């Protein structure tokens, strides 16, 4: 076997092989293949003639191989047959170039030894003797000594034999060397993969068994080969003669070609095409491979004509007649299917067009309704090089421009903003860039849109960058599976051997999607020459290199072709060009190069002379050009043009040309294959990618029959390049090397959360494909494969090892026990900034809170990104000089140290220094490419750690690197393109900093820099320099928490050129004493904001005892050096609220039994036997006394029952008094109603009414009710006129639920009604008992004081006294943007369900309706990928189907099938109650709901997940935090008292807020008053009701409020410095005065000397509960004849619509709506709530389809609000006596009720079954309104409708309504027929006035209801009528009366006293809900 292997080893191998064989099915067909293959080489049978073709299976091992075979089978024979990769040529054809075999060979030596042994009876055997002779012959001794040694060996008797040996010593030594080389090549062919010929294009067969045994053999060999490297003697000692003999006889066309370079490049070649020639020359050798002839067209193969494509697709192929062969073959699959595709084809075969076809297929799918839906898809094209990306971008954007597609490049050089990304349909990017983008969850929205991923040059997998492609593909494939969306992957690659595995990795179906084309498909066949220089002397080698290169170029020129010479550095281009010109002079071949005969020569020469590049001009004379990336763009373009026009014959260029520019030439020479790679820190070989790309430029498709590619390399690399280019290098995975970084990225992204998922993720990589096929290459032993064929434990080991390392570096938290990963900030930063794991370890070690500049630079220099940079002797002088000239900071370690060198280059980059030596230039370029992101990452790390000094320091350096300006230089250097260096230098020398310059005048600055005009310039640029002003208001919330309202005022001139679209500022709050940052946020200042008012930010910060002297708020620009603003928060005279939180202890009492109520009826109300501890402790006070009570206890502790005790007490003592129960939310009201209706009402026989926006009870109901349940607004509206409403004064008990909501937006109303009720009770001297219920409070004392609660009635329990204990988990998530952040929380939410509550009910709270849907869909998807899609559902299929049939909401119907419910205000009541019932009965396990559910419905769950704590505030146009009370309420829903031992809450928050929530969820929150902001409306109401007549009354009124209580306790919160009485009273008096003045300005009240009185507008505001701003706006905008359009604008401008949410991106929907509605809106303000309200109204009237379901619910609330606003408008018009405006406004109300246009639509449309045909048909018969139809007799109606069959009408009906009916008389019954009888009477009392008697009667005898028929209005409404008395001729209005009646009504109206204008006076009857029901009666006729 080539070395003495021990028997034991061989037996072990054989037994392993047998065990392997047993894993495979016995198939003797395969074994015969194996035998023949072993002998194929010797027989010369056509190789592969009778193979049985089968797809490769994993390991094939044969039964024939038992031990003997293994020992006998010649191991090297397997390399005898040269298998051709591309065609099945038979072996015999290879021998035409064989050198004549010598007679004297080792065979002869063997025979001679045989004779000697027989004759001389030698002790040695034949082979041993022969081996010994070989060693002697091969030694370096002189001839005589060798002869002596030989005689010693064979004995004197064989003297002739020794003579022969000495004579032919040279031939024998050659033979020995040949044999050794052969053996060596066998040993080093570690990566060989034996290939069969490929028939057709797709089928390959591999016999894996040989490969595996080969590998084992090599493994054994390695052990023996330790010492022997290249010394032949050693090799001989380790070889046996028989194998040497056989090896020496293997002759082949490329017999001793194999180089023996070190490392992976020393590979054997296993196949070269037919006709290969080999020539030896002095010092080098040449292998010539002839071009592969183009394969002929197969029968039936045809090219696809371009006109066969769709119309839109032809546009992209303008100028093409047809596709080429390759494109035509794959066209069907690419263009008509969605298959993933892998195309392996030679360079230049038109793979770009294949990508184009795939793109067109994708575009075709989004081409609907005649236009392209661009926002539905993105296409990503991943190209390996920036240069290539640029080329692809320009090519594709040009070709796709007819389709209006935007193609943009996204690489390190070309960044795209978010908007640009949104507008782009096709993104061309590099693998790394796309990896960075998909790593961030904030860009999920982008990757979700990707529908097609094209990966160019997939064979990059073998490169060290291959790991990135693996990570990308794995991420994409997992996204496809998890989201179940289609992303098509198209892989394009050069011809590669292991294409089957790559196809498997890309999930390509080998039958349909895999295409493999060999080199015969090259459009221009390529002849290749490989030249290996064997000269060792450096100088001689270089000379030879130039000479060979020159000769090759001249050969090409002689044939009339152009040539390109590729070199590997910019400097080399000029050197080589010079050398070529010099050699041509010496050889007198200059004429060949020159091109003076070209017709345009003289013209072009002039153009060339203009160039600044001396080389370019000089070489042009000689017909030579140079091209590299360091040249100017114009020069490069010129050179390219000259070459393509043939004016330059030889172009010397760098490899970038091959990538970036499509310039072909006939001959391409690669001169040398060593290139300098700064990343590797030295020279490396030109990679396969580059060589293929460069050779791809050989041969011009239109002109040449063939092209020529010549590669000149060193002899030892020859074999490597031959194998590369005959594509026999299997591609291995490089993934393990970057496993840690990629694992961290997935964990940070949230797609991998535990070891199991990580192993799954690994299964999607190319690594897992290759690991199974070639385990040894990945360090997996044979025994491991045997034990675990699927290698799952190996994968697990890899993952665990990586996770441990990441955990150690603090990048993830890895819990070994559960196998869970959780991401840390550090890991996230590393992932987003692409920082390697090893660098993070370095930073963990070196980063400290205080470092100086040089230490920081040194730390950056230690990053592993730079670890390969080498220090070279020849660079030392230059580095020392640079350190002196360009480095302001000390260099640690000096230039001779690696890190010293890097830190010099970093400083050099910031100093913008210049470098001479080439290797330093590329090192510097490499460093500067990574510098910015490393510094940014370090800044983020310091910021997260909260270090003040280092954070600002690193931010300075981020900007220094971005701008290449040192922080200590003058900041105006940032305008260095506009300000001259001279000015800047002088400013620096004079030390004029910005502040000083700001204060100076222009002329002074001019004088300072000694250049007068410069002053103006400097001043101008000072104005562009971004400054902001900060001011802050600080209000203490508690003693340890401050609330800061920060105002940011921009103070500079915005210029797009400098400031772009937005400027980013870091807002940092820092405590310099303790060096800590308490708050940081990134603030975006847009151009629009910079013009407007100051921007306000609010946040909370902690404060500690003892107080630091001050905090600083800093705003630091993210991109401008020295641009920052300070604000100091001083704590000197900050008054903090007193710390007094007194909690009631929960006493250890025995629970009271229900019987202690002492009333049987009462006891039966409760289904439990004992009260809980809290109820027990409060029982006596509530049930047996009349004391006021404030009960603070956590949610879920039974406060409602405590309130019931007080109600029962009232029923016992004062049964005639009323209970009023105030609940802040409609939802709570509804819950109370349902609960009490079942118990109190039915069992105690009491009356109860509900008062909310939805329900307004009539007077009788209110009078008779015992319990009134109301929202604060309703009660406020009713109790305002308490003087006239007796039932208000009959309230005996007021229960205020959730009174801690005083601090929320609606708190002021609560405050007012309590203050008013206490005021009323003091006036009427009837006591009202107050019961306040709340969560645990921080300042219960103040609340109690305000409610009049004494010591005995105050109970304030701790948050911890819950009946069911709660465990809370708070998890932070980063991500600037809200939606992606919510998205990234879905997986943790699912994980939380699986961990904490796999089977018990779960509530998930989200902030919006949209989020309920998205969250539910994601949960379903995660459940499905866990293979339990229905794990949340627990009801049988038939029950489910029955329930689904009742559900109306689409989304809900979908999610219910998976056991997940949705709950939000947008559902109708039926759906909502159905869901509540399903959840309460555990039929569904998960309920995703909006926050209202927490308040309204008592549905506790075991686990509550709060997903995000912000919601979008439409008014502020940004996301704001939920009030803490809401969060507590949501948490309170966790834990079900009857079932759970404890509840669980998981709160997912935005990372920066985590500490805030940790603090406040357990520390009760103080309640502050917000009355001050809403004082105007309440003061106005009290003035109208007569409570306030003077300023004193107002002051007295304020003392009743809670605001007054808090003002004294926490003055700083309300902007008051001190609480001394005189300061306090002047503060209040000023507040009242300001409020009065504002109200007077708005026309609501009138102030006179001693008091105030209400005006009409004020009364209307109070009556209709409108804001004083709204009525003031009405007052100034409504006129005598306002049009309908103006009324609509006024209506939507009401401040009641301020809160209408305009959610994210809704302005786009609004824009679309605005195009479809009749009235214009302001298109610049589409994100304004009022504009949206206007559009919603118009859409309602036009009956447009609303874009999303949110709009439907928004419309409901808008319509609901609008009724009272319109009624107020009618009152204002009527009070002003404007007839036409009044009537227009009434029409507007009718339009709102019916959803029709008054002026455009016929009132017939009110009928449910109306259709356009019917309207026009009735119109022809003269009927245009419902009124006319009603007046027709019944019989006539049928005749009118003849010709309209019932079916037609019912179909028309189907279009508008859901239930079909036939248009019959029934439909008309919906509408009333009103008959009016009038009579004028003279009134008796005051003489002369007339009154009008009016009798109204409804004529529909069988119509019972007075409900309005308004199907499009969301609420139930009763009909009402207006009687308007006016004179249409002069548009005067005298009187308006509003009436409603069920059957008939008699009423009267006073006529005006002056009867002069009775002429035109009319009485008009209008409906408030029907269009076209007007009746006019002239008074005169009476």
Image (tube, rainbow, N blue to C red):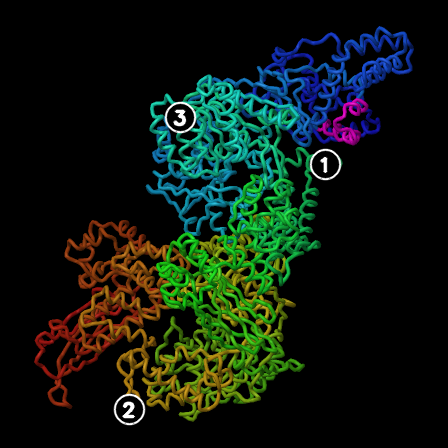
Q: Residue 1758 magenta-drawn?
A: no
Q: Residue at x 17, y 78 (%)?
A: 1934
The image shows residue 175 at horizontal and vertical percentages of: 74, 15
User: Can you tell which quarter of the image residue 472 is in?
Assistant: top right
As drawn, is 819 to the left or to the right of 134? left
As drawn, is 661 to the left or to the right of 1041? left
User: Can you tell which quarter of the image residue 1833 is in?
Assistant: bottom left
User: Can you tell which quarter of the image residue 1056 is in?
Assistant: bottom left
Separation of marks 1 and 3 at Cα, in angstroms: 62 Å
User: Which residue corresponds to mark 2?
Assistant: 1649
Separation of marks 2 and 1 at Cα, in angstroms: 101 Å
Q: Residue at x 62, y 12 (%)?
A: 97
Q: Residue at x 58, y 32 (%)?
A: 686
Magenta stretch: helix, strand or loop mostly? helix
Circle 2: is it few (<14), some (14-19), or many (20+) Cα within 10 Å?
few
Residue lying furthest front: 1010
User: Which residue corresponds to mark 1?
Assistant: 785
User: Which residue corresponds to mark 3?
Assistant: 647
Q: In this rendered view, identify the residue nearer to me: 1450 or 758.
A: 758
């Amino acid at each position: 076997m080539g070395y003495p292997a021990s028997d034991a080893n061989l037996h072990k191998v054989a037994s392993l092989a047998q065990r392997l064989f047993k894993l495979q099915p016995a198939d003797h067909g395969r074994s015969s293949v194996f035998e023949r293959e072993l002998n194929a080489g010797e027989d010369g049978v056509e190789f592969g003639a009778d193979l049985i073709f089968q797809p490769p299976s994993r390991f094939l091992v044969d039964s024939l191989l038992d031990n003997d075979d293994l020992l006998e089978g010649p191991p090297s024979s397997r390399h005898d047959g040269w298998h051709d990769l591309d065609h099945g040529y038979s072996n015999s054809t290879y021998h035409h170039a064989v050198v004549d075999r010598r007679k004297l060979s080792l065979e002869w030596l063997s025979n001679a030894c045989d004779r000697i042994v027989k004759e001389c009876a030698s002790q040695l055997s034949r082979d041993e003797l022969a081996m010994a002779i070989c060693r002697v012959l091969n030694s370096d001794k002189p001839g005589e000594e060798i002869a002596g040694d030989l005689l010693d060996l064979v004995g004197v008797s064989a003297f002739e034999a020794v003579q022969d040996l000495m004579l032919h010593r040279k031939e024998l030594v050659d033979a020995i060397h040949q044999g050794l080389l052969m053996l060596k090549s066998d040993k080093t062919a570690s990566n060989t993969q034996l290939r069969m010929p490929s028939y057709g294009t797709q089928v390959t067969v591999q016999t894996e068994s040989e490969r595996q045994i080969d590998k084992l053999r090599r493994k054994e060999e390695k052990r023996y080969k330790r010492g022997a490297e290249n010394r032949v003697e050693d090799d001989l000692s380790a070889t046996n003669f028989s194998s040497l003999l056989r090896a020496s006889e293997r002759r082949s066309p490329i017999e001793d070609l194999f180089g023996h370079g070190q490392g992976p490049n020393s590979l054997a070649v296993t196949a070269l095409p037919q006709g290969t020639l080999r020539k030896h020359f002095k010092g080098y050798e040449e292998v010539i491979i002839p071009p592969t002839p183009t394969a002929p067209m197969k029968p039936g193969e045809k090219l696809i004509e371009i006109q066969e494509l769709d119309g839109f697709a032809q546009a992209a192929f303008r100028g093409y007649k047809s596709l080429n062969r390759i494109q035509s073959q794959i066209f069907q699959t690419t263009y008509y299917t969605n298959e993933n595709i892998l195309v392996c084809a030679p360079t230049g075969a038109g793979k770009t067009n294949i990508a184009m076809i795939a793109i067109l297929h994708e575009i075709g799918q989004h081409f609907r309704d005649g236009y392209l839906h661009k926002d539905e898809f993105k296409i990503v094209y991943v190209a390996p090089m920036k240069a290539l990306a640029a080329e692809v971008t320009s090519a594709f954007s040009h070709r796709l421009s007819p389709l209006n597609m935007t193609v943009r490049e996204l690489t390190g050089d070309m960044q795209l903003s978010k908007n640009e990304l949104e507008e782009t349909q096709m993104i061309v990017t590099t693998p790394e860039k796309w990896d960075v983008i998909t790593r961030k969850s904030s860009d999920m929205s982008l990757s979700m849109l990707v529908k097609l991923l094209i990966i160019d040059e997939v064979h990059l997998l073998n490169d060290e960058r291959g790991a990135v492609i693996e990570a990308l593909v794995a991420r994409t494939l997992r996204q496809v599976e998890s989201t179940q969306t289609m992303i098509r992957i198209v892989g394009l690659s050069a011809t590669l051997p292991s294409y089957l595995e790559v196809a498997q990795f890309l999930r390509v179906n080998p039958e349909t999607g895999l295409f493999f084309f060999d080199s015969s498909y090259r459009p221009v066949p390529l002849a290749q020459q490989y030249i290996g220089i064997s000269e060792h002397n450096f100088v001689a080698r270089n000379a030879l290199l130039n000479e060979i290169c020159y000769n090759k170029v001249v050969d090409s020129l002689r044939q009339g072709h152009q040539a390109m010479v590729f070199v590997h550095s910019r400097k080399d281009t000029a050197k080589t060009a010079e050398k070529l010109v010099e050699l041509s002079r010496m050889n007198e071949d200059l004429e060949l190069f020159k091109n003076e005969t070209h017709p345009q020569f003289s013209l072009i020469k002039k153009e060339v002379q203009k160039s600044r590049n001396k080389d370019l001009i000089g070489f042009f004379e000689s017909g030579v050009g140079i091209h590299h990336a360091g040249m100017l763009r114009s020069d490069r373009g010129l050179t390219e043009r000259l070459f393509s026009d043939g004016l330059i014959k030889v172009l010397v260029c760098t490899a970038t040309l091959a990538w970036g520019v499509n310039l072909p030439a006939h001959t391409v020479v690669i001169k040398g294959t060593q290139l300098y790679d700064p990343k590797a820190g030295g020279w490396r070989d030109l990679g396969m990618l580059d060589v293929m790309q460069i050779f791809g430029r050989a041969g011009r498709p239109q002109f040449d029959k063939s092209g020529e590619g010549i590669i000149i390399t060193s002899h030892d690399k020859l074999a490597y390049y031959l194998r590369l280019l005959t594509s026999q290098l299997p591609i291995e995975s490089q993934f393990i090397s970057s496993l840690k970084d990629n694992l961290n990225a997935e964990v940070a992204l949230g797609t991998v959360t535990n070891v199991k998922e990580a192993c799954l993720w690994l299964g999607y990589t190319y690594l897992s494909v290759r690991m199974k096929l070639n385990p040894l290459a990945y360090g997996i032993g044979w025994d491991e494969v045997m034990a675990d064929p699927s290698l799952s434990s190996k994968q697990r080991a890899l993952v665990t090892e990586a996770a441990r390392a990441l955990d150690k570096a603090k990048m993830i938290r890895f819990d070994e026990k559960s196998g869970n990963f959780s991401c840390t900030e550090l890991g996230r930063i590393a992932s987003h900034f692409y920082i390697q794991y090893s660098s993070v370890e370095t930073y963990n070690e070196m980063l400290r809170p205080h470092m100086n500049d040089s230490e920081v630079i040194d730390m950056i220099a230690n990053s592993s990104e730079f670890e390969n940079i080498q220090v070279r002797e020849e660079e030392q002088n230059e580095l020392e000089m640079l350190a002196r000239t360009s480095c302001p900071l000390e260099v640690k370690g000096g230039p001779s140290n690696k890190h010293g060198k890097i830190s010099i280059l970093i400083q050099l980059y910031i100093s913008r220094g210049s470098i001479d030596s080439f290797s330093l230039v590329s090192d510097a370029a490499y460093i500067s490419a990574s510098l910015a992101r490393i510094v940014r990452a370090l800044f983020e790390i310091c910021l997260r750690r909260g270090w003040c000094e280092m954070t600002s320091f690193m931010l300075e350096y981020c900007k220094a690197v971005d701008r290449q300006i040192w922080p200590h230089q003058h900041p105006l250097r940032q305008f260095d393109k506009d300000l001259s260096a001279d000015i800047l230098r002088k400013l620096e020398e004079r030390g004029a900093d910005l502040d000083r310059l700001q204060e100076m005048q222009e002329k002074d600055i001019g004088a300072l820099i000694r250049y007068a005009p410069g002053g103006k310039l400097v001043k101008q640029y000072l104005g562009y320099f971004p400054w902001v002003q900060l001011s802050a208001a600080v209000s203490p919330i508690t003693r340890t928490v401050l609330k800061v309202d920060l105002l940011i005022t921009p103070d500079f001139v915005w210029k797009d050129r400098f400031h772009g679209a937005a400027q980013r500022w870091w807002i940092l709050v820092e405590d310099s004493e303790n060096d800590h940052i308490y708050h940081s946020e990134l603030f975006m200042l847009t151009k629009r904001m910079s013009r407007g008012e100051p921007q306000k930010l609010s946040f909370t910060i902690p404060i500690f005892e003892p107080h630091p002297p001050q905090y600083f708020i800093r705003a630091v620009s993210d991109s401008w050096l020295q641009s920052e603003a300070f604000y100091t928060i001083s704590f000197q005279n900050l008054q903090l609220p007193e710390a007094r939180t007194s909690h009631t202890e929960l006493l250890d009492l025995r629970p009271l039994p229900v019987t202690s109520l002492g009333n049987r009826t009462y006891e039966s109300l409760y289904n439990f036997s004992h009260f809980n501890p809290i109820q027990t402790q409060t029982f006596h006070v509530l049930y047996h006394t009349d004391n006021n009570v404030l009960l603070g206890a956590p949610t879920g502790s039974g406060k409602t029952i405590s309130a019931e005790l007080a109600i029962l007490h009232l029923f016992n003592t004062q049964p005639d008094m009323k209970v009023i129960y105030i609940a802040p939310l409609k939802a709570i009201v509804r819950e109370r109603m349902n609960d009490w209706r079942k118990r109190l009402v039915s069992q105690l026989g009491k009356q109860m009414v509900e008062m909310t926006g939805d329900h307004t009870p009539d007077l009788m109901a209110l009078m008779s009710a015992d319990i009134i349940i109301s929202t604060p607004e309703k009660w406020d509206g009713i109790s305002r006129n308490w003087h006239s409403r007796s039932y208000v004064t009959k309230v005996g008990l007021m229960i205020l639920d959730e009174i801690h909501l005083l601090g929320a937006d609606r708190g002021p109303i609560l405050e007012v009604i309590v203050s008013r009720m206490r005021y009323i009770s003091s006036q009427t001297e009837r006591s009202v008992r107050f019961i306040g219920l709340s969560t645990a409070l921080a300042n219960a004392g103040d609340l109690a004081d305000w409610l009049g609660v004494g010591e005995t009635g105050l109970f304030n329990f701790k948050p911890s006294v819950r009946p069911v204990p709660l465990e809370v988990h708070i998890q932070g998530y980063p991500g600037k943007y809200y939606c992606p952040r919510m998205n990234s929380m879905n997986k943790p939410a699912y994980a939380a369900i699986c961990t904490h509550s796999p089977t018990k009910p779960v509530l998930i709270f989200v902030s919006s309706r949209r989020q309920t849907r998205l969250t539910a869909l994601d949960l379903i998807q995660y459940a499905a990928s866990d293979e339990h899609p229905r794990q949340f559902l627990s009801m049988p299929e038939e029950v489910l189907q029955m329930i689904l049939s009742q559900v109306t909401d689409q989304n809900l119907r979908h999610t219910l099938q998976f056991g997940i419910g949705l709950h939000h205000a947008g559902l109708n009541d039926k759906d909502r109650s159905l869901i509540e019932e399903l959840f309460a009965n555990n039929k569904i396990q998960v309920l995703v709901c909006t926050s209202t559910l927490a308040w309204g419905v008592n549905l506790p769950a075991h686990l509550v997940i709060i997903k995000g704590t912000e919601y979008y505030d439409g008014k502020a146009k940004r996301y704001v935090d939920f009030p803490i009370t809401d969060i507590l309420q949501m948490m309170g829903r966790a834990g079900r008292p009857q079932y759970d031992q404890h509840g669980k809450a998981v709160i997912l928050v935005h990372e920066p807020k985590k500490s805030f929530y940790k603090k406040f969820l357990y520390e009760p929150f103080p309640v502050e008053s917000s009355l001050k902001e809403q004082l105007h409306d309440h003061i106005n109401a009290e003035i109208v009701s007569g409570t306030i007549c003077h300023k004193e009354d107002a002051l007295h009124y304020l003392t009743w409020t809670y605001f007054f209580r808090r003002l004294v306790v926490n003055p700083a919160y309300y902007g008051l410095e001190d609480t001394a009485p005189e300061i306090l009273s002047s503060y209040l008096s000023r507040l009242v005065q300001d409020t009065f003045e504002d109200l007077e300005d708005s026309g609501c009240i009138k102030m006179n000397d001693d008091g105030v009185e209400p005006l009409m507008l004020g009364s209307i505001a109070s009556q209709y509960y409108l804001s004083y701003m709204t009525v003031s706006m009405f007052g100034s905008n409504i006129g005598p004849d306002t049009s309908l359009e103006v009324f609509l604008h006024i209506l939507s401008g009401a401040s009641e619509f301020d809160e209408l949410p305009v959610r994210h991106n809704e302005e786009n929907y609004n824009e679309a709506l605005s195009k479809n509605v009749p009235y214009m809106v302001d298109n610049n303000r589409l994100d304004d709530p009022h504009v949206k309200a206007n559009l919603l109204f118009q859409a309602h009237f036009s009956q447009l389809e609303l874009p999303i379901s949110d709009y439907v619910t928004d419309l409901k609330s808008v319509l609901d609000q609008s009724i009272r606003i319109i009624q107020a408008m009618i009152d204002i018009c009527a009070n002003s006596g404007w007839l036409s405006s009044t009537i227009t406004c009434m029409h507007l109300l009718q339009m709102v009720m019916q959803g029709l246009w008054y002026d455009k639509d016929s009132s017939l449309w009110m009928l449910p079954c109306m259709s356009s045909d019917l309207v026009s048909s009735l119109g022809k018969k003269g009927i245009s309104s419902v009124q006319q139809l009603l007046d027709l007799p019944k019989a006539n109606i049928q005749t009118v409708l003849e010709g309209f069959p019932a079916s037609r009408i019912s179909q028309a009906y189907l279009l508008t309504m859901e239930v079909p009916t036939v248009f019959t008389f029934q439909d008309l019954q919906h509408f009333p027929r009103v008959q009016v009888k009038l009579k004028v009477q003279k009134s008796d009392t005051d003489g002369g006035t007339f009154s009008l008697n009016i009798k109204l009667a409804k004529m529909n005898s069988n119509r019972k209801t007075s409900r309005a028929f308004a199907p499009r209005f969301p609420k139930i409404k009763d009909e009402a009528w207006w009687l308007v008395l006016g004179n249409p001729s002069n548009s005067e209005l005298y009187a308006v009366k509003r009436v409603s009646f069920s059957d008939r009504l008699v009423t009267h109206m006073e006529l005006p006293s002056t009867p002069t204008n009775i002429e035109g006076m009319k009485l008009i009857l209008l409906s408030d809900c029907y269009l076209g029901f007007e009746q006019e009666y002239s008074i005169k006729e009476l």
